[in-house]
Image (spheres, rainbow, N blue to C red):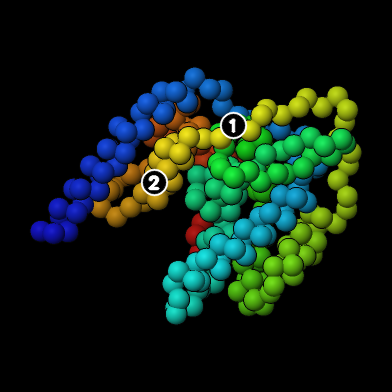
């Protein structure tokens, strides 16, 4: 009886979250959805690689601390690595704090104090992350699990040995490049709601519950995940992988 009541409460909680988020969605629907600027990737891919490597290291350390004294498994590390470049997953929230700043003939990734609206810069970083890590996420996770390297060694392995993202200097940014949009911080409520929505994805007792990104909601992509997945695959340049 207790389990039955719990299964009924979870969908109700989900509905309440959606209702409380409606004013935010109504405001967000007026904004244009960001699209990745593929031409910017060569200028930022090394920095993206360094940041994703740091995130992998930090998130694995945080996971280990959370489950101690139990030892983190290789599968759990792989799962973190697989989600680092997917904005629909909590592991990729780090991308939302990055602003691409023009400095002379270079582009610099500058971390902000809070998460920002996901515009074209956010999508560009996600795309760069996907292109850099690609099928190498499992190899990076295996290296971290077996070698237990320091952060500097992990960055060097992923960005120079495994992917070669930092094997050469980025080319100079063209003088006629159109500047990116300004970084717009999210409201505290919006950030909190999005994190809650992500945490509820796949929750037991709520069959069929799906997590929709802001972009899905703004494009009204409800109940058509197959089409959305195909779009993500095309953008990433490699097919979706099943869980291990």
Q: Position of residue 151 (x, y in %)?
A: 69, 68
Give the quadrant of residue 22.
top left
User: Going by the image, does 229 lie left or right of 180?
Assistant: left
The one nearer the camera, 141 or 48, is 48
Q: Residue furthest left?
A: 1
* Numbered disc 2: secondary structure: helix
User: Going by the image, does 142 lie left or right of 242?
Assistant: right
Callouts 2 and 1 close, C-beta under 8 Å? no
Q: Position of residue 58 (x, y in %)?
A: 59, 63
Looking at the image, which residue is at 76% across and 59% down? 159
Give the quadrant of residue 177.
top right
Q: Residue furthest bottom?
A: 69
Looking at the image, which residue is at 62% across and 65% down? 57
Q: Residue furthest top?
A: 30
Looking at the image, which residue is at 71% across and 29% down? 180
Looking at the image, which residue is at 39% across and 44% down? 197
Is 231 placed above or below 170 here? Answer: above
Q: Position of residue 160 (x, y in %)?
A: 80, 61
Q: Closer to the camera: disc 2 or disc 1?
A: 1
Q: Which residue is mark 2?
A: 196
Tell me if I can see residue 138 in this picture.
no
Rendered-image quadrant of the N terminus: bottom left
Give the quadrant of residue 38.
top right
User: Going by the image, does 205 lie left or right of 36?
Assistant: left
Whichever of callouts 2 and 1 sits on the residue coming sooner in the sequence is 1
- Circle 1 residues within 10 Å: few <14, some 14–19, many ≥20: few
Q: Which residue is mark 1?
A: 184
Is 71 placed above or below 85 here? Answer: below
- Circle 2 residues within 10 Å: few <14, some 14–19, many ≥20: some
């Amino acid at each position: 009886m207790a389990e039955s009541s719990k299964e009924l409460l979870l969908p109700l909680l989900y509905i309440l979250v959606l209702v409380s988020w409606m004013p935010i969605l109504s405001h967000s629907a007026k904004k244009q959805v960001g699209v990745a600027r593929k031409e910017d990737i060569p200028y930022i891919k090394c920095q993206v690689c360094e940041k994703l490597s740091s995130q992998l290291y930090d998130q694995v350390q945080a996971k280990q601390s959370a489950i101690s004294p139990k030892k983190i498994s290789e599968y759990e590390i792989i799962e973190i690595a697989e989600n680092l470049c997917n904005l629909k997953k909590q592991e990729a929230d780090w991308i939302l704090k990055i602003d691409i700043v023009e400095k002379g003939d270079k582009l610099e990734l500058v971390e902000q104090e809070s998460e920002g609206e996901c515009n074209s810069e956010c999508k560009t970083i996600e795309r760069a992350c996907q292109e850099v890590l690609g099928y190498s996420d499992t190899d990076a996770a295996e290296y971290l699990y077996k070698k237990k390297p320091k952060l500097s060694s992990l960055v060097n392995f992923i960005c120079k040995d495994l992917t070669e993202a930092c094997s050469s200097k980025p080319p100079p940014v063209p003088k006629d490049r159109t500047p990116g949009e300004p970084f717009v911080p999210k409201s505290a409520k919006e950030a909190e709601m999005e994190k809650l929505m992500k945490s509820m994805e796949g929750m037991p007792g709520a069959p069929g519950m799906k997590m929709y990104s802001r972009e899905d909601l703004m494009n009204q992509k409800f109940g058509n995940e197959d089409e959305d997945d195909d779009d993500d695959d095309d953008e990433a340049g490699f097919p979706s992988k099943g869980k291990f």
